[in-house]
Amino acid sequence: MRLTATAMLVLMAAVFLFSRQYLGVHPAWGYVHAFAEAAMVGGLADWFAVTALFRHPLGVPIPHTAIIPENKDRIADTMAQFLRDNFLTPAVVARRMQAMNLARAMGDFLVKPPAAGPGGAQSRIGAGAAELFAGALESLDPERLGGQVRAGLKHQLDKLEVAPLLGQMLGAAIADKRHLPLLDAIVRWAGLTLEDNEAMVRAMIHERANALLRWTGLDERLANSVLDGLYKLLAEVLVDPNHPLRGKIEEGLEKLVHDLQHDSEMREKVERMKRELLDNPAVADWWQGVWERMRTALIAMARDPDSTMDGWFGSTLAELGAALQGDPRLQMQVNRFARRTAVGVATRYGGQIVQLVSETVRRWDARTITDRLENAVGRDLQFIRINGTLVGGLVGVTIHALVHIL
């Protein structure tokens, strides 16, 4: 745009010189000459005005030129004052936030973002949320984060009395007969363990038998009898739901359920075991390993394009958006929270934000602030030069015509 405005000024100068040679040929050349002359004057005047905002025209330090570089500190203070008076006062923030239904707008966007569809904003929201989640997990110190999670769990478990809870769970399982498969599995495991260690049992019986039993060979018969009896007992317990041993086990479990809930000594014993377990360094090391594997797996899932995590995030955000859309009470709560947060930020940090703006602009050198403002509004300023050239030419033609008419 600067080249265009300059080229138009040069063109008017060329037309001015060319038309001057033909003024006596025809009266029309006088109008052309007047247009070019006034256009040059208007273009040069507006070039001077536009240039004087940002620098000294032609490098000559004419008074009241290079206005922006010479007054950048005052501009910084004015910008900061404008920001303070129109945006960062608590009353202004509260009034503007009062008229906004931020929760509804957020819900509309989450339910149907712009350009939603395959590969559109909806999928980008999910992918962005997944990437943000992965980045947060990566940026945090793994050991410190794992320690904080472990400390939080430990704190919650310290406050939780587990003995009554275990008693209630065990009692509910017994009442629904859900413990019977576990009891059968324990009996089968005992039988298999006995079979695998049969040689050790025989050796123990042989070692404890006296010399007479070993000399007569009765120790072997005794071992066989003991093993056969144990196998028979386990088989009977397994196939007979009314076996007396099962009844004894049931009585023991019922007593355990009662003691866990009502016996202070048993509850204290369980609490002591819980505290010893939580304070055990081996448990802390185990949890750190578990947490690190969980963290690594979550990061891999979030960054895997074939994973459904980004879709899960997207669907979760869409559900949140639907809730924000359709629940006026939730909208009111979210809007109230947003309004209080914004007012709190303006009250507590408004002065610091304004000071940051002022100090940042003050720290800019004259060249920086000139370039930034000129890049922001320079195109429109060059239009002023173009318009000045054209308007000046039209004014020149008008004055030339009035002179001849009057």
Image (cartoon, helix red, strand yellow):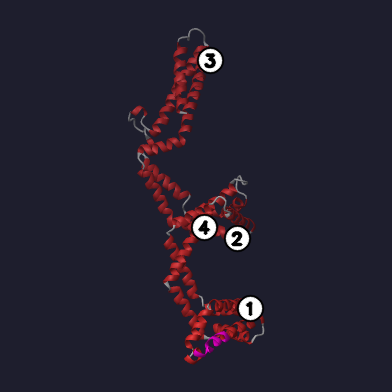
Whether residue 255 is visible: no
**Residue identified by numbered label 1:** 180
Query: Residue 70, position in %: x, y?
Result: 35, 37
**Residue identified by numbered label 2:** 330
Looking at marks 4 and 1 on the same chain, the residue that comes earlier in the sequence is marked by 1
Looking at marks 2 and 3 on the same chain, the residue that comes earlier in the sequence is marked by 2
Q: Going by the picture, which residue comes out furthest to the left? A: 61
Q: CA distance from mark 2 to mark 1?
A: 48 Å
Query: Residue 177, position in %: x, y?
Result: 65, 78
CB-based contact (under 8 Å), mark 2 and mark 1: no
Helix, strand or loop under label 3 = helix
Looking at marks 4 and 2 on the same chain, the residue that comes earlier in the sequence is marked by 4
Q: CA distance from mark 4 to mark 1?
A: 38 Å
Q: Going by the picture, which residue comes out furthest to the bottom? A: 212
Looking at marks 1 and 3 on the same chain, the residue that comes earlier in the sequence is marked by 1
The mark closer to the camera, 3 or 4, is 4
Viewer-nearest residue: 147 or 82: 147
**Stretch in magenta:** 215-225
Q: CA distance from mark 4 to mark 2?
A: 31 Å
Q: Amino acid at mark 3?
A: Ile
Q: CA distance from mark 1 to mark 3?
A: 120 Å
The mark closer to the camera, 4 or 1, is 1
Q: Residue at x 47, y 91 (%)?
A: 211
CB-based contact (under 8 Å), mark 3 and mark 4: no
**Residue identified by numbered label 4:** 298
Q: Indicate whether 292 appears above or below 58.
A: below
**Residue identified by numbered label 3:** 405
